[in-house]
Image (cartoon, rainbow, N blue to C red):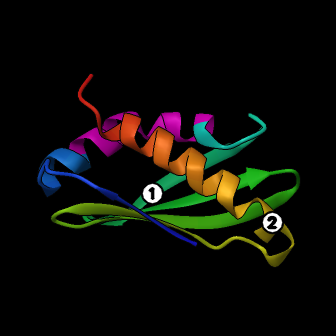
Amino acid sequence: MRVPLPHELGKDEVRRRMKARSHEIADAIPGGMAEVETSWPNEDCMALDIKAMGNVTRAQVLIEDTQVIFEIDLPPALSFVEPVIAGAIRKKGQKLLEAK
């Protein structure tokens, strides 16, 4: 699943905001019972391991010049909740990119 979010911030500012607020990502996951671990394999990619309900789902956030793309390897058994997850990512993702 891919969820693009447009921005006009520039990569450096997006990186700064994502690093400063990455601890808020778990709040965007429906159910409120997820644990999220983040790492930065390179400056334009934040990797996420999302642990919820005994499963680990891998995701990444790709930072581009005009958009941030959230990519999630959603298990087939959860494909029915894809619209809910995409909506939550759009809502929370925009908040992560907003100035504090």
Q: Which mark is residue 39?
A: 1
> Which residue in the protein does label 2 denote?
80
> SS of the residue at dot 2?
helix
| In the image, farthest residue toward the bottom | 76
Q: Residue 58: image x %, image y %?
A: 62, 67
Q: Which mark is residue 3?
A: none
Q: Is residue 75 left or right of residue 21?
A: right
Picture residue at 24% right of the left edge, 50% below the top: 15
- Work out whether 96 lies above or below 47: above
- Magenta highlight on residue 73: no
Q: Is residue 23 left or right of residue 30?
A: left
Mark 2, residues whose alpha carbon is within 10 Å: few (<14), some, or many (≥20)? few
Q: Amino acid at mark 1?
A: Ser
* Span colored in magenta: 16-27
Q: Is residue 29 left or right of residue 68?
A: right
Picture residue at 56% right of the left edge, 65% below the top: 59
Picture quarter with the C terminus: top left
Count of numbered labels shown in the rendering: 2
Chief secondary structure of the magenta portion: helix
Q: Looking at the image, which is closer to me, 41 or 72?
A: 72
Q: Residue 62: image x %, image y %?
A: 35, 67
Q: Is residue 21 left or right of residue 77?
A: left
Picture residue at 77% right of the left edge, 59% below the top: 81
Badge 1 or badge 2: first in the primary sequence: 1
CB atoms of marks 1 and 2 within 8 Å: no
Picture residue at 50% right of the left edge, 52% below the top: 38
Picture quarter with the N terminus: bottom right
Q: Looking at the image, which is closer to me, 49 or 90?
A: 90
Q: Looking at the image, which is closer to me, 50 or 70?
A: 70
| In the image, farthest residue toward the top | 100
